[in-house]
Image (cartoon, grey):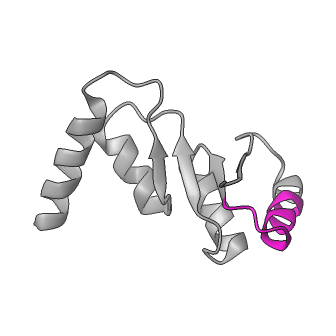
């Protein structure tokens, strides 16, 4: 079963690096975090070896696309309007076909 660690968005960078080091050494399957800058930090520290799940502040296509552009592998759209996931998927498909 996959093991995902959720990191607080206001975690100090030194603490984040300690936790990410632990994750890499212990085969954690991914990290869940919010904020584009935090997503970039996780990817930079892990060298892209830890999948990142973006959560929080994903209320429209622009925010979802920004999280993916920052390096998120997945989006957690748990508390979003009902039609948002299908709308985001349609817009992502359209944007990548252009």
**In the rendering, at what x and y percent does residue 23 appear?**
80, 63
In the image, 64 versus 74, the foreground residue is 74
In magenta segment, residue 53: no
**In the rendering, at what x and y percent does residue 5 appear?**
73, 49
Q: Which residue: 40% across, 52% down?
A: 66
**8 versus 70 height, above or below:** above
**In the rendering, at what x and y percent does residue 19 appear?**
85, 57
Which residues lie in the magenta part?
17-29
**In the rendering, at what x and y percent does residue 70 appear?**
48, 60
User: In the drawing, does residue 56 fall left or right of residue 95?
Assistant: right
Q: Toward which corner of the image does residue 98 lie, by quadrant? A: bottom left
In the image, 26 versus 35, the foreground residue is 26
Q: Which residue: 78% across, 70% down?
A: 24
**58 versus 73 height, above or below:** above
**33 versus 26 height, above or below:** above
The residue at the far bottom in this view is 47
User: In the drawing, does residue 36 fall left or right of residue 61?
Assistant: right
Q: Which residue: 70% across, 72% down?
A: 46
**22 versus 67 height, above or below:** below
């Amino acid at each position: 079963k996959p093991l995902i660690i959720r990191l607080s968005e206001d975690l100090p960078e030194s603490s984040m690096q300690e936790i990410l080091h632990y994750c890499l050494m212990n085969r954690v399957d991914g990290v869940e975090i919010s904020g584009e800058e935090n997503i970039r930090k996780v990817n930079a520290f892990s060298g892209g070896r830890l999948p990142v799940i973006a959560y929080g502040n994903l209320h429209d296509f622009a925010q979802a696309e920004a999280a993916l552009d920052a390096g998120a592998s997945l989006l957690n759209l748990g508390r979003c309007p009902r039609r948002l996931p299908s709308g985001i998927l349609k817009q992502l498909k359209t944007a990548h076909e252009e």
